[in-house]
């Protein structure tokens, strides 16, 4: 199975400041169809996961534009341009290129 | 509005069985693949199983293969997960999630139902 490795596992951030989470896959996530199926999910405390980004950089409807995704091959990044209090939670990368789909173990974002 | 509502969780002894349900509304259920994803207490997300739109194709994680069975009733817009031979390590919140067609992803999640396997 493809192993997704996030970095860091814990990220203390200051309100209004930028934040960046990385995710590295053990294999290239370029599918045979040419697409790269890398997703980012946010899980706020006590809530279900919510998808933020799909196919590396496509933001879901209703997701604030302070969230952005980038990357290629095996290295991917989720950036928050200015952290707000509601951004506290755990962020998971997930690959949908290789079966079975796999998630990273999560990066916990908290306010300093 | 897309809604997925899981039910059927509870406390069960090791070796026991449980059937989870996921009631869908707000979309044409019969047109979508649906997935089960679980999350052990304080841990990350793990994909469990998926089923195609008409119920003829299913896939399972190795950890549950032969013990869990996914099925669906499109007339009732309901997804099921029959869990047999339960183990302590199956303890988790179980989420159903809708497949995002053509994106190799899931776009909507239910609120989850907790399964606790303990003697």
Image (spheres, rainbow, N blue to C red):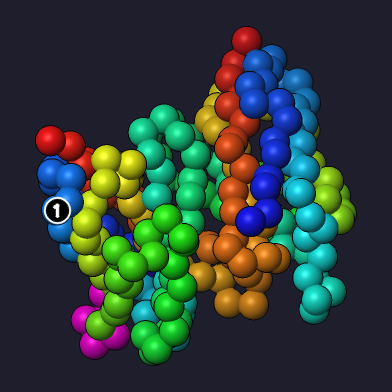
Dominant SS type (magenta): loop
Q: Residue at x 40, y 50 (%)?
A: B38
Q: Is residue A104 above or below residue B110?
A: above
Residue A87, visible in the rendered structure? no
Residue at the spot of label 1: B16
Q: Nearer the viewer, residue B40 or A71?
A: B40
Front one among B63 and A101: B63
Assign the C terminus of chain B to one quadrant of the image: top left
For label 1, count other residues whose C-alpha is less than 10 Å away and answer few (under 14), some (14-19) or many (20+): some
Compared with A71, A96 (above or below) is below
Magenta segment: B74-78
Q: What residue appears at the point 30 percent right and 71 percent down from the top-left corner?
A: B69
Q: Is residue A31 visible?
A: yes
**Horizontal side, residue A105 vs residue A38: left or right:** left
Task: Look at 38% across and 39% down and name the residue there.
Answer: B40
Which part of the image, by quadrant, shows the N terminus of chain B? bottom left
Q: Residue A29 location, x and y as percent?
A: 78, 60
- Quarter of the image holding residue A95? bottom right
Q: Residue A67 falls in which quadrant of the image?
A: top right
Q: Position of residue B71 (x, y in %)?
A: 30, 77
- Residue appearing at x 36%, y 33% in the figure: B41
């Amino acid at each position: 199975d493809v192993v997704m490795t996030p970095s860091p596992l814990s990220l203390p951030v200051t309100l209004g400041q930028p934040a960046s989470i990385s995710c590295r896959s053990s294999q290239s996530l370029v599918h045979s169809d040419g697409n790269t199926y890398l997703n980012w999910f946010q899980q706020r405390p006590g809530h279900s996961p919510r998808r933020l980004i799909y196919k590396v950089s496509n933001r879901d409807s209703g997701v604030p534009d302070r969230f952005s995704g980038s990357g290629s091959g095996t290295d991917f990044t989720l950036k928050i341009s200015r952290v707000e209090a509601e951004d506290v939670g755990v962020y998971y990368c997930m690959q949908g290129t290789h079966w079975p789909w796999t998630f990273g173990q999560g990066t916990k974002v908290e306010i300093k | 509005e897309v809604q997925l509502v899981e039910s059927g969780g509870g406390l069960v002894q090791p070796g026991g069985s449980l059937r989870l349900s996921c009631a869908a509304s707000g979309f044409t259920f019969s047109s979508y693949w649906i997935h089960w994803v679980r999350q052990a207490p304080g841990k990350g997300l793990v994909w469990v199983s998926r089923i195609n739109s008409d119920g003829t194709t299913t896939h399972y994680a190795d950890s549950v293969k032969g013990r869990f069975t996914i099925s669906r009733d499109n007339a009732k817009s309901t997804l099921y997960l029959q869990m047999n031979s339960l183990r302590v390590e199956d303890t988790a919140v179980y989420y159903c999630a809708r497949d995002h067609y053509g994106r190799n992803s899931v776009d909507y999640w239910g609120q989850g139902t907790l399964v606790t396997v303990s003697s």
